[in-house]
Amino acid sequence: MQTISAGYQSLSLLINLNWDRIMYVAAIGGALWLGSVVTQIVL
C-alpha cells in the first residue's frame, strides 16, 4: 500500500511540474487535428 501511495505522489508531482508542457502538446495536437478536419471539409 505504501508503494502505491509513493507512486501516486511521484506521478502527481510530475504532473504538477509539467502541466504546461502537457498543455502545449495538447494544443499543438488539437491544432493539427482541427487543420486536417478543415482541409477535408474544404477539399
Image: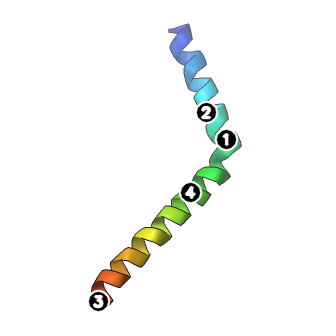
The residue under label 2 is: 12
**x%, y% of residue 32?**
46, 70
> Circle 3 — which element?
loop
Q: Residue at x 56, y 20 (%)?
A: 7
Q: Residue at x 65, y 35 (%)?
A: 14
> Circle 4 — which element?
helix
The residue under label 1 is: 16
Q: Residue at x 49, y 71 (%)?
A: 31
Relative to 17, residue 37 above or below:
below
> Circle 2 — which element?
helix
Q: Amino acid at mark 2?
A: Ser
- The span from disc 2 to disc 4 (Cα, nearest Å) is 18 Å
The answer to which of marks 1 and 3 sits earlier in the sequence is 1
The mark closer to the camera, 1 or 3, is 3
Q: Mark 2 packing: few (<14 Cα in 10 Å), some, or many (20+)?
A: few
Q: Mark 3 packing: few (<14 Cα in 10 Å), some, or many (20+)?
A: few
**x%, y% of residue 33?**
41, 69
The mark closer to the camera, 3 or 4, is 3
- The span from disc 3 to disc 4 (Cα, nearest Å) is 27 Å
> Circle 1 — which element?
helix
The residue under label 3 is: 43
**x%, y% of residue 18?**
67, 44
Residue 39 in the figure: left or right of residue 32: left
The answer to which of marks 2 and 3 sits earlier in the sequence is 2
Q: Mark 4 packing: few (<14 Cα in 10 Å), some, or many (20+)?
A: few
Residue 41 in the figure: left or right of residue 29: left
Q: Amino acid at mark 3?
A: Leu
Q: Amino acid at mark 1?
A: Asn
